[in-house]
Amino acid sequence: VPLQGQPGTPGANWELLRTTRGVAWAQYVGKVRAHFEEPGGGHAGERALATLLELDLVPAADYPALATHALGDLPPAEALAACRRLGGADWPELARGLGWSLLAHHGFDAGAALAVARQADGELAPLLCEALGRVGSGGHATVEGLAEELALGERLDAPAAYFEGLGHRLLDVKGDQRPAGYFRRTLPVFLVHPTGAEAWLRDVPGPRRAAVERGYRRARALSRVRAAVPALPSAQAGD
């Protein structure tokens, strides 16, 4: 927003800056994990996750991303056991981050991973299907990639939870035109350009749109904060 003066008027830009969360706790997993990389010390990612959760600072909205970064290299059964062990009553939020574990364990075959997720017992099945939607085909989310992941879900007749996961992924979409330098491929464009996300949603086929939109709306709401800094006076908000 400061670099490009977008997505809109100064008032709209200010509103986004003051109400969008600026901390992604998942970025701390690697920093904490490095302190536990020692022979015989147990799984470093799980220990890092336990440390971050003990701080009691991380909102549950960030639990899926924490689990993705901390437990993604574990087999699904072990990753799930860690979620139950560390998450307490909030373990389902951690389980929403097991998509990478499932995908990697099945050779990045989304169809095979989704088949296993759908066969899980009880409430676990929709959690794992959503988790797969959140990671898509793996790697950075792009507009083109998300369209392919949407089409894949349709071909596999994926459940609504998968498409809700794709809705969460929509908030991570990276754009093609970025300032040169560090942010070129890492800035989540739709996070600060909601009109772009809204336009993409309008093109989603009708039967799937409701589920994708539910996931996106939830992700958008979780990305907001009650800002301590004041809003612009209403007379200037559109200037």
Image: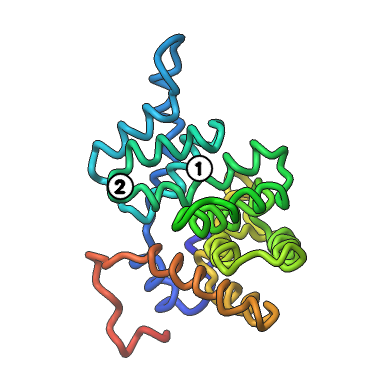
Quarter the C terminus occupies: bottom left
Element marked by disc 2: loop
Mark 2, residues whose alpha carbon is within 10 Å: few (<14), some, or many (≥20)?
some
Instruction: Work out whether residue 52 can be spotted.
Output: yes
Q: Position of residue 117 (x, y in %)?
A: 59, 51
Q: Where is mark 1, residue-wise? A: 68
Q: Position of residue 163 (x, y in %)?
A: 60, 66
Query: Residue drawn at (72%, 38%), measured in percent from left and top?
Result: 107
Q: Amino acid at mark 1?
A: Thr
Q: Position of residue 64 (x, y in %)?
A: 44, 49
If you read the primary sequence from the N terminus, does the residue marked by circle 2 or circle 1 appear first?
2
Mark 1, residues whose alpha carbon is within 10 Å: few (<14), some, or many (≥20)?
many
Which quadrant of the figure has residue 169?
Answer: bottom right
Q: Residue furthest bottom?
A: 235
In the image, is residue 231 above or below residue 174? Answer: below
How many marks do you count on the picture?
A: 2
Viewer-side residue, 65 vs 153: 153
In the image, is residue 216 above or below residue 134? Answer: below
Query: Residue drawn at (39%, 45%), measured in percent from left and top?
Result: 25
Q: Amino acid at mark 2?
A: Val
Query: Residue drawn at (32%, 33%), measured in percent from left and top?
Result: 50
Q: Is residue 204 left or right of residue 122?
A: right
Viewer-side residue, 143 vs 204: 204
CB under 8 Å between callouts 2 and 1?
A: no
Instruction: Work out whether residue 189 can be spotted.
Output: no
Q: Is residue 146 left or right of residue 134?
A: right
Q: Is residue 11 left or right of residue 53?
A: right
In 3D space, how far apart are the residues under numbered discs 2 and 1 (Cα atoms)?
15 Å
Q: Where is mark 2, residue-wise? A: 58
In the image, is residue 124 above or below residue 85? Answer: below
Residue 155 is labelled as none
Q: Position of residue 236 (x, y in %)?
A: 35, 85
